[in-house]
Amino acid sequence: MEKPFLLDLTSTEENLKNDIKDIDYRKNRVNILGINSLNKYRLNKKILIFTRIDDPEIDYLGKFLLEAGIDYLRINAESIFTEFSYSIEVNDKLTGKINCNSTCWNIEDIDAVWFRHFSLDTIPKSNSNVDNMYVREQWGIFFTLLSNLDIRIISGFEAEKQFIKPLQIKLAKDVGFEVPNTLITNNKDEVKKYFGDISVFAKVLMHHNIEYKPNVLKHVYGRIINTDDYPKETFKIAPTIFQNLIENGKEIRVTFFGKYIFGTEYKNVEHTDWHDQGIYGFNMKEYIIPSKLKKKLERFIDKSGLYVGTIDLILVDNNCYFLEVNVNGDWRWLEVQTKQKISQKCIDFLKEVV
């Protein structure tokens, strides 16, 4: 079988196992000082966080969550079989317990659940495809159930599969954003008919990382392509998003936590997709969001149902083009370089909604 052309264009891989360190603040505090060391905090709220060991945002937030009176349990995908367990009783109402790292919580006492970099793809795999399918199905039911209990959901289980890019683009147009001309297809002839004989931008329909084995990511970033350079068969294998090029624009990333909205401007981006350049390969500075644009962003966020995320925009003259929203959102790398107080506003948001 032919290889999908966009996958064939991307050869970079990242092995998370080489760098990850378990530096979660709460876990290490309890391991070193004991569970009673948490008594110094006035903890009156509980939040369950499903993520990865490699999550700089949660690493950084941990201490501040406790200081804000929010206790949290962090369940990392890599250790879900060894450090986490649960039980649920099905009666008139669902009750049960969550156990993680020497801590036991009643499910009915949990105030919020936050799924970050966590999906069925991230849990450990065995060498048996049958075993993997069985395990994924069983855990998938639990995560879906947890998302449907009477608990505040900060970001839902595999939310990116619910609010996919085509729906993001449609909503953006509905609230008044300009959007690049967009075609989703696996038919090369349709691309040529829609855009003509010009170069177009091609990108994936969902996430640009494929975790094809534990902790190893294949990066599939967007590319400028000429359709004539690739045979029809490489288009047919996988649908792709095609958009016209927006050139000479200013790239903006918007980070939001409910009503708290931040803008960051990218400068000196040398590649068509900044991921290729690395997050420290260009300059960033705070972008003051104009009131008209902020109102569009607020409408989009409200209608999307998201509480947390990052939105990518391109500004050309007075036109603002919407590209996509990341329903998880990473911001620590932005505030480190721009000195914006993004994490503090995340804590403020959680104090208000948890």
Image (tube, rainbow, N blue to C red):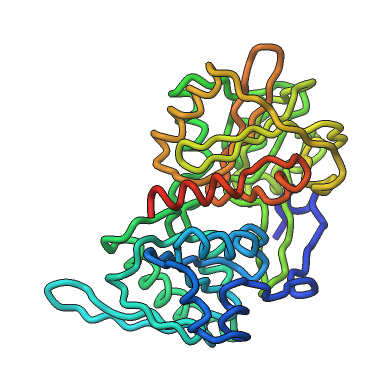
* Quarter location, residue 64: bottom right
Closer to the camera, 9 or 331? Answer: 331
Horizontal and vertical percent for residue 85? 42, 84
The N terminus: image quadrant: bottom right
Q: Is residue 248 above or below residue 78?
A: above
Closer to the camera, 109 or 42? Answer: 42
Q: Which residue is pictured at 64% across the width and 64% down the height? A: 59
Closer to the camera, 115 or 99? Answer: 99
Question: In the figure, is residue 222 to the left or right of 322?
Answer: right
Residue farthest to the left, as pictured? 92
Q: Is residue 21 above or below residue 61?
A: below
Q: Answer yes or no: is residue 180 visible.
A: no
Q: Which residue is pictured at 51% across the width and 37% down the height? A: 260
Horizontal and vertical percent for residue 108? 27, 70
Q: Which residue is pictured at 68% across the width and 40% down the height? A: 340
Horizontal and vertical percent for residue 83? 52, 85
Q: Answer yes or no: is residue 20 visible.
A: yes
Horizontal and vertical percent for residue 78? 60, 77
The C terminus: image quadrant: bottom left
